[in-house]
Amino acid sequence: MKLLTYIPACGALLVACLLAPACKKALDTKEYSALTPENFYQSTGDANAALMTLYVPFTSNWGNDDPGTSGPTWYAGLYNADIKTYFSKSEVGTDEVTNTATDGNTGPLVNYTWGPSTWTLASGAEATYSKISYVAKATDIMTAIGASSAVPDAVKKQYIAEAQALRAWLMYVLYDFYGPVNVKVNEATLTDTAETARPSDTAYVNQMIGDLNQAMPNLAVDYNGDAANWGRMSQGVAKMLLLKIYMMKKMWPQAQAAAQDIISMGVYSLMTGPGSYAAIFNTSGGSGSNPEVIYGVPANQSSPNFWPQEVFPQDFASAEPMVAPRAVGWITQFMPWAFYNKYDAGDQRLTTILSSYTNTSGVVKNESNGMPGAIPLKYTAVQPGLVGQNLDVVVFRYADVLLSMAEAINEQTGPAGAYAYVNQVRERAGVSDFAGMTQVQLRQAILDERGRELYCEGLRRQDLIRAGVYISTAVAAGKNAQPYDVLFPIPESVILQGRGIIQQNPGYTN
């Protein structure tokens, strides 16, 4: 794929080259040997600088140039709140989040009218498939660090493990949206320009699982409470990814074992006490006072959390008691009232959702006078003077582990052993325990509970697909959903440049 041809890179040196016209030749696709272990990976600092480039996709940044592709290519981080990203495409258009915008990116996503021609790479409108280049980058960096004689063995093992686990995470993200894609995981063929077919589902899934299991022993256990290293790959994150893969594939015994493995670590627990649910999203996992977040994207003003700005209405002025007067919002994403009404009165999680606000004309808006849905604020400690917030974007947390454990047990043996896990989450929310259900009833109850607990954390699309109701839920809401919409289309430009070797997902035509 010429558009996404991988160019071996060496971290900070290559990023610096982007800023200097004289370095343009270093980015040419013919210069594969310009940067090598012999002329760059000459210290632990070099290796760490290269490794850090693999974390670039896992940010909330509005956009960056990828120096590892011809062009180079510009696109947003996976966990940015814009509609083009992995995070937002996993939420918007589901039963828990929709959008009032009708622009060329949002409209098709909300109405299920997307297709290969709207999944464009050149404009940066599709910011997930583009990350395929980082899989190749990870393969390259693993090989180069391994070949370096300047990096101590213990550090080398850790850095290679981080790169390998990040490669698996990138593959997981791509698989979630597109199914198996033709990633480059073989260093011997890394720079080959010949097109390759998409691998089988089994081979792709086994590659992800193998990478994570191989990396695990050489990763730090966790970085909770370690502000200097918060955001790095750890055993906790790798185990969470294994759990996600097993849940996606409905490998229930393996999912139960993976969830138990995380629970048995003794590192993570639910936040408890008054206001604990809101505190999860207002306290960094790197601070030492948040034991629930397994991974959060570190946010600062270079890479802030834009989610609150995306959900504030365009005529927003203030809301009591959470939000002081502030700037108006952007394109309104909101929670449909039908979903909001699934919460019990007194549910602690409602303290992070606004059911009314005062607009710029001084009118209090709510469901009765035209407010299209609730505001799924999630991050309540917003600072009025900031558009992007300094609040970590929560990606993985312990409540998800407990709910996954409950689901895996229920699918195997029924409700009896599952209640203990799902009810921990409900008790923290201040609502009554589940009891007296059939397996089918608890299956639906857990799906609903996942929605209430994990709303706007980028999980709803996948949850609905796993439950087999993604399409039927959309159709019931009047959307143009088709059975094949459980996968997104491979971008049209990739199919055209694949010259018949890279096949489109079923149901889509170019």
Image: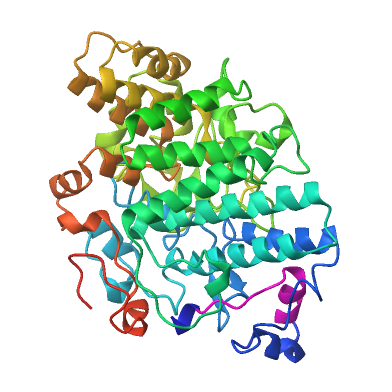
Please give the count of numbered marks on the rendered protein: 0
In the rendered image, residue 434 lying in the magenta stretch gets the answer: no
- State how the image is colored: rainbow
Q: Quadrant of residue 283?
A: top right
Q: In the rendered view, tell whether residue 452 sits above or below residue 371.
A: above
Q: In the rendered view, tell whether residue 471 sits above or below residue 442.
A: below
Residue situated in front as seen by the camera: 466 or 394: 466
Residue situated in front as seen by the camera: 87 or 92: 87
Question: Left of 359 or right of it: where is 285?
Answer: right
Residue situated in front as seen by the camera: 197 or 345: 197
In the rendered image, residue 16 lying in the magenta stretch gets the answer: yes
What residue do we see at 54% from left, 42% from top?
213
Question: Left of 53 or right of it: where is 359?
Answer: left
What residue do we see at 25% from left, 70% from top?
115
| Residue at the extreme top | 436
Question: Left of 89 or right of it: where is 95?
Answer: left
Q: Quadrant of residue 419?
A: top left
Q: Quadrant of residue 204?
A: bottom left
Q: Quadrant of the C terminus?
A: bottom left
What stretch of residues is rendered in magenta? 5-18
Residue situated in front as seen by the camera: 366 or 48: 48
Question: Left of 157 or right of it: where is 94?
Answer: left
Residue 325 placed where, x, y %? 57, 44
Task: Confirm whether residue 360 shows in the render.
Answer: no
What residue do we see at 35% from left, 19% from top?
345
Task: Confirm whether residue 223 shows in the render.
Answer: yes
What residue do we see at 57% from left, 60% from top?
57
Residue 401 placed where, x, y %? 46, 28
Q: Quadrant of the N terminus?
A: bottom left
Residue 34 placed where, x, y %? 72, 83
Residue 227 placed where, x, y %? 76, 39
